[in-house]
């Protein structure tokens, strides 16, 4: 029986920044690793807990992380970018059983999907954490280059603060121009 490769994404919905998709295959039985007892969907963990688990997951897994720029999202569309990221993960992590969190296989034959897999399947939870931490770290790093937008506070999501920054300064080169914002885009 093939080992499981869990796949999840972070950054499908934000107005700015990249999409991040991660794939994780555990090297060994993780039940002996006490830190993994709390592994869960990245959205259900605190930032501190995600950060603590990030290195432990990397040390105990074969993994691949794909970042896709906002410009590629604008050019190709989010679904194609997710599909291309999954295919890249499958190319780097070969010959596993692939399971994606969500409700579609994006037309990929050997990819299974399960809604809420990030909360119930440890490999998918781990992929969720790798994707979220990687993307959050990226948004924190660009915050220094674009301080007016305060990316480290909202990570590019459509929060009230982020909307105020867009209204005040317009969109930056990191914004997804194909994403229309109600009340801003005409």
Image (cartoon, rainbow, N blue to C red):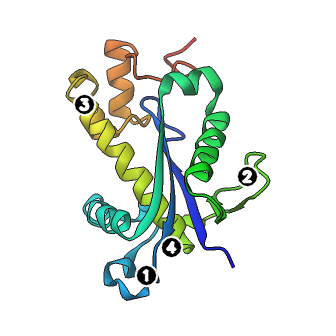
Q: Does 22 sit left or right of 82 as displayed?
A: left
As displayed, is residue 140 above or below residue 175? below
Q: Which residue is mark 3?
A: 143
Cα separation, mark 2 vs mark 1, equals 28 Å
Q: Which residue is mark 4?
A: 122
Q: Secondary structure at mark 4?
A: helix
Q: Nearer the viewer, residue 64 or 167?
A: 64
Q: Earlier along the polypeptide chain: callout 1 or callout 4?
A: 1
Which disc is residue 165 wearing? none
Q: Which residue is mark 2?
A: 104
User: Percent position (x, y) of residue 20?
Assistant: 47, 43
Q: Secondary structure at mark 1?
A: helix
Instruction: Give the number of the mark in front: 4 or 3.
Output: 4
Which residue is depicted at the point 48% across and 60% down? 127
Which residue is depicted at the point 58% across and 65% down? 5
Q: Is residue 48 visible?
A: yes
Mark 4 vs 3: CB contact within 8 A: no
């Amino acid at each position: 029986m093939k080992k499981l490769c869990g796949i999840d994404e972070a950054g499908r919905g934000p107005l700015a920044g990249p999409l991040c998709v991660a794939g994780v295959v555990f090297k060994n039985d993780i039940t002996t690793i006490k830190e993994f007892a709390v592994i869960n969907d990245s959205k259900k963990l605190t930032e501190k807990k995600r950060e603590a688990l990030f290195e432990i997951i990397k040390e105990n897994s074969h993994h691949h992380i794909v970042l896709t720029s906002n410009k590629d999202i604008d050019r190709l569309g989010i679904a194609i970018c997710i599909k291309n990221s999954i295919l890249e993960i499958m190319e780097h992590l070969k010959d596993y059983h692939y399971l994606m969190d969500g409700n579609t296989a994006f037309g990929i034959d050997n990819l299974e999907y399960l809604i809420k897999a990030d909360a119930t399947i440890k490999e998918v939870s781990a992929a969720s954490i790798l994707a979220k931490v990687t993307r959050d770290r990226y948004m924190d790093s660009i915050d220094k280059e674009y301080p007016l937008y305060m990316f480290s506070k909202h990570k590019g999501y459509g929060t009230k603060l982020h909307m105020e920054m867009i209204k005040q300064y317009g969109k930056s080169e990191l914004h997804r121009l194909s994403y229309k914002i109600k009340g801003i885009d005409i």
